[in-house]
Structures are given as C-alpha cells and as structure tokens.
Amino acid sequence: MSGEWRIGVDIGGTFTDIVLLGPEGRLSVRKVSSSVDDYARAIVEGLAVALDEAGLTAADVADIRHGATVASNAILERKGARVGLIGTVGFRDVLEIRTLRMPRLYDLAWEKPKPLVPRRLRVTVPERIDANGAIVTPLDMEAAAVAIDALVAKGVDAIAVALINAYANPAHEQALKALLAERAPGVASCISTDVLPEIREYERTSTTVVNCYVLPVVGAYLKSLQAGLSAAKVDAPLSLMQSSGGLTPADAAARLPVHIIESGPAGGVVGAQALAEPLGESSIVSFDMGGTTAKAALVIDGRAERAEELQVGGEAIQASRLLTGQGYSVKTRAIDLAEVGAGGGSIVWIDAGGAMQIGPESAGASPGPVAYGMGGDRPTVTDANLILGYLNPAGLAGGDRPLDLEAARAVFQAKVADPLGLSLEDAAFGARRIAVANMMRTIRAVTVERGRDPRSAALFAFGGNGPLFGWDMAMALGMNRVIAPPAPGLFSAFGLIYAEVEHHYGRTLRRVLANADASEIEAAWAALETEAIDQLVAEGFSGPTQSVKRTASLRYKGQTHELEVDWTGPISAGKLDALAEAFGEEHARVYGHRAGAAEPVELITLRVSGRGLGDRPPLARASDRSTGTHGARQAYFGPKLGWLETPVLSRKDLVSSRKGPFIVEEYDATCLAPPGVSGEINDATGAIVLR
C-alpha cells in the first residue's frame, strides 16, 4: 500500500540507524556505519538498502523523521559559523561576563569556555529600551549600518542581534533585521526576539548566538540531505526531532536549529514513553548506551521530565546537575537528559596513579574498537565485553561486523591486565565495573538529584550496549526490573516514529499577580495561542488534530528562578488568585514548603505549546533478525562465579520465562541476563522483561 511506511533515522557517533514501520506494526530495521565526513550520505545509501530489504520502493514512504547530531557536533568540535554579534552600547561583554554559575566551586584554575563570538567580532550600537518596553534612546540607524558593514568586512558567516530589554519591545531588533536584509543579504542572521523573546540577558544572548553558530552548518546539512533524498526519488516530508521530544518540519529546523541540538537522544526517550503504558509501567528510567555516550532520562506517569535550559559545548557532557555553567547556555524546552562519555567505544586506559579509567575519549566509528579490525590499537569497553564472552565472536549486526577476539585479548593483556597485575578476564570485568560506576551518575542525576527514588521504577535499556549493561545498572541502583524493547540498538530511531509535531512559544510579561491586569495577560496568552494554531494549520493540522496548552512561569517576588504551572482556559480577574494558588502548590511539591498568603507572587513568562496529533502508529512487531547462532558459550561473571556455560538465545526463545544466565543475540544489540535473573517476552510490545 503506497505511502504508508514511516521512517525513523538516527545518527550516532558509530552507526546510523534506520527503522521502517508499516501497516499492522510491520517493522524493518537497518544499521549502517556513520559517514562522518558527510552524515547525509549514510542516510541516503542506508535507506536505499533498507527499502530494498523490506521489498519497498520510495513511493511507499509516508514521511521521514530524523534525529540529528549535526548541531551538537558543530558546537562540541567548535566547527560552527564565524559569528558576529550586535548588542547595545555598554553591553559588549555579556557573553564573557555570563552569570555567577560555575561547575567547580572551589577550583581556582577553572576557566570559562571561550565565547563562541570573540570580542573583535562583537560590536555595539547606540539604543536603549527600558524594562517596561519604553524607548529611552532611539536606535542610531547610521551607526547600525556602520556596525553591519564592519562585521561583513571581517568575513563573518552569520550575524546575531541581542539588544538589552528587547524582549519587552522588539522594535529596534526588527529595524536591525530589516537593515541586515538590505546591507548583508548573503549573510545568515537572527535576532533574539525571534529566537527567545524572554527575560535574562545572558541566556537570551547566548541562545541567539548558538542559533547563529549552527545556522549555516545545519542549513547546509539539511540541503544536502534533501538533495540526496530527492535524487533517490524519496519525496516524503522530512521532520526533525527537537530537544523537547516533538517534531518540527525541516524548514523550521533550518531556521531555528537551536531547538534540535539534543535531537538524537530525545528519540529514544519518546519511544520509551510510548511503550511504558502498554507495559503497565507508570515510572521508567530510560538508559541509552551507544558507542560513545550513555544517556538517562526519567518518565513519570507517561510524561518525560523536561528542563528549561541546556548547557552545550565545553564540558557540558557530564552527569551532575547540581552545578551548571560548564558550557554555553541554551534556554529552550528539552527533555531532561543526563549524559556521560561512556559507551562501547570508550577507551580503557591507566592513569598516572596506576588506576584504570574509562573514557571519555572514544574510538568512535573509525578506527573503532580493536576487535573491529579497522586499525584500532587501544582497548575499549566493547573489547572487554568480547573477552568476557558476552558478545558473539562471529560478529555484530548479524555478522556484518566481524570481531577479532584474539586481537582484543592481546591488546587488553598488554595495555591493561599486565600493567595492573590482573588476569585477562578480571581486567576486562573490572573495566566493565568501572563503566557501570561512571554511567550510574547519569541515572542519579535525573532521579536522586531531582528528589526521585529510582528503586520503584523500571530501567528501560536500549542503544547498542544498553541491554548488555542494563541489569548491572539496575542492580547497582536497587532497581528490580529491566526492559529491553524491540530493536533496542536502533531504538532512538524507533522512538522518532512515535513522536508528534510540537511547537513552543513564549513571551515575558513581568507582573505581580495581585496588581496585574487580567485582560492584558489573556491578550498575551491568546496571541501566543494564535501563533501556535497558525503554525499547526500551515502544517496540515486542524480541529481535533490540534492540541494547545497554556503554561505560566511564576515565582515569589525576589526569587531568582521560576516554576512552571499548567493553566486551562481563559484567565480573568477572578482567576488570578487561582493561578497564584497553583504556583503555591507547585512550590510546595518541589521544595517542600510554600510562603504565606501575603507573599506576592510574580508572573514572569507566559508560554504556549502546540501539538499536531496525527494517527498513532501501531505497536511494532519486530521481524526476527537474530544472528542465527544458538547453543551456548563460556561467559565470565566475576571472580565469585567465574566462567559459566551460558545459553545463547534469540528473542522468540523467551515466549516462556527463562532463568539466567543467558544471552539474547539480535541484529542490533545483545541482552545479558546474569545468574539469578529471569526473563520473558511481553506479549503486547515484544519487549524483553528481566526481573
């Protein structure tokens, strides 16, 4: 049936994953090596192979949903655009002054990350708007023209504009936007009130600069990808996953790429969220371990926890959320993810003190682990798992990726076991234990550090290495259930299929509720709703396929940060007290206390989210992509248990409960159940449930 297959594509540091979901839950998957020089090439070529394997043509594709790492990679590798910044006179150094937040309170040697815009490319113009939106000093258009010409002469690729208090009145930024189109038509540009029309000078400026920094990179990538798909006669709509877990059309992502920085990791959380309900799980911790990183998120009552700000670049890839300031601030709605540099490709090394360390450096896609036989000469976590007998020596991905056991053993012996005076298997097992200890920090960051107890939740393990480490992680955290979903090694791509179109809009409107004009608040909220509905209508959603939700960020007057509360329906003078009460209840839930009735509550920002509700895809029914290898092999379970004969199964062998130890081998991942653990398939979802 033509045009009924949805495609999910996720790019990882090692592999590009492609998932096809058709009528009645038919599922077909394909994993190919990422083409680091041009990520689009692996997608186009891999999709052609995946369609051919499934017996499909380009005409069978209804739409393509893509999780991209292009924006985040550009920031991490400092390979973004050469950006110029225009600010208000007296505010040239907002990017360097930043805020008082810092990740290492007592480290006098810590240095802030270098600004994405060096000082020589930051210029200012005479203008001033006060905090209430009144124009104090009109914009000097002649000086603005000179500033733009100076930046163009210095060869900038993009120009960002962030004027003081522009969130209260965007008139001067709009004037600069028109002037940029006139004097620098070939230079990409964006103004802060188009990117983030909200209070807080550093966060607004930083978010705008980050958007400009990745704007040409993401634009060029999407243009290349769409050209490749068009050449392959795949003309289906292309959507990008946002950091928030919602989809956005490719043209919107090209215009505001700041919203897709954490695009890739969000897909897996959305997939876990979709499967939690049919599995009967109200709370789950998603654990995504790939080749280079491990990520965790918390889903409660079917809803992923959200964050209002990201730290990107610099040292931002770390698990602790108690301290911030390690990267560049991006104030955008995002799934609350914690991430650490630990994956299958993470390098195992010995530090100067003689202690074993794991990562954060990774062997990546090339040369990859030693066992891949592609020139790698440093031991990795994957090499350790192969030595321990957990991975099939015949190869990964159904044999598409042969593994060299002897090479892995030789390198691990020489570079880890011998220097530490350990047997080969104990050195490999120790590396695995350290990897688990590193990755535990990600789960603690989204649970314990958020006041949540992980012990009642199920661990949802996916990614190429997630099911291989799932039980070790659960055991260390006191959790008693691990779920390995269908196609776990491609699950971030799988999750994209279940995502919905989503757009977020906000406007700062600082008012003490006791003195506020309810009609002004209602008019501002209604304007945001109109903007959301217009966007949804433009994308083909109308009537019952639209969902629009209001929220408000409030605080007690004098506080630094706000809490967000939901609101339903219009707001009127008689309902302002109810809004204040909703904030008080949320404050008590989060912090355990609330202020007295006389304490003034201050509204800071109004927000609206608009969602396009398409037909919900059926639950997937994975085809059997096992390696074809059954029987048993020796696997090492630590000094106490030693080497044990371990059955090797396919997923379909778990239709009835089995006791561990056993190993489930599939095309895209390996699931390990140690002694003392039982596992079976959940009929509704096809997921493996370990208890």
Image (tube, rainbow, N blue to C red):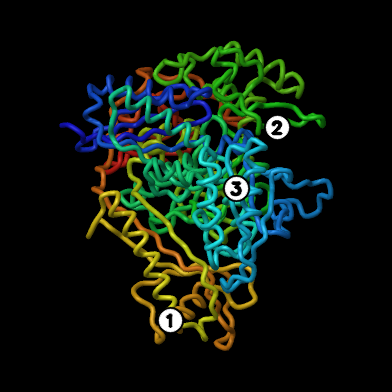
Q: Residue at x 25, y 26 (%)?
A: 58
Q: Which residue is identified by label 2?
A: 357
Marks 1 and 3, the one that precedes in the sequence: 3
The residue carrying pointer 2 sits among few (fewer than 14), some (14 to 19) or many (20 or more) residues within 10 Å by Cα, namely: some
Estimate the spatial distance between the alpha carbons at disc 3 and disc 2, rounded to whole Å: 36 Å
Marks 3 and 2, the one that precedes in the sequence: 3
Q: Residue at x 59, y 84 (%)?
A: 599
Q: Residue furthest bottom?
A: 598
Q: Please name which of the two marks, 3 or 2, marks the residue nearer to the observer.
A: 3
- Asked whether residue 455 is in view, the answer is no
Along the line of sight, the residue nearer the viewer: 567 or 511: 511
Q: Residue furthest left?
A: 1
Height in image: 566 above or below 221? Answer: below
Mark linked to residue 209: 3
Along the line of sight, the residue nearer the viewer: 105 or 254: 254
Mark linked to residue 518: 1
How many labels, in total? 3
Residue 503 % position (x, y): 40, 54
Mark 2 residue type: Gln
Decide: marks 3, 2 in contact (CB < 8 A)? no
Along the line of sight, the residue nearer the viewer: 363 or 232: 232
Q: Is residue 442 left or right of residue 103?
A: left
Element type at mark 3: helix
Mark 3 residue type: Val
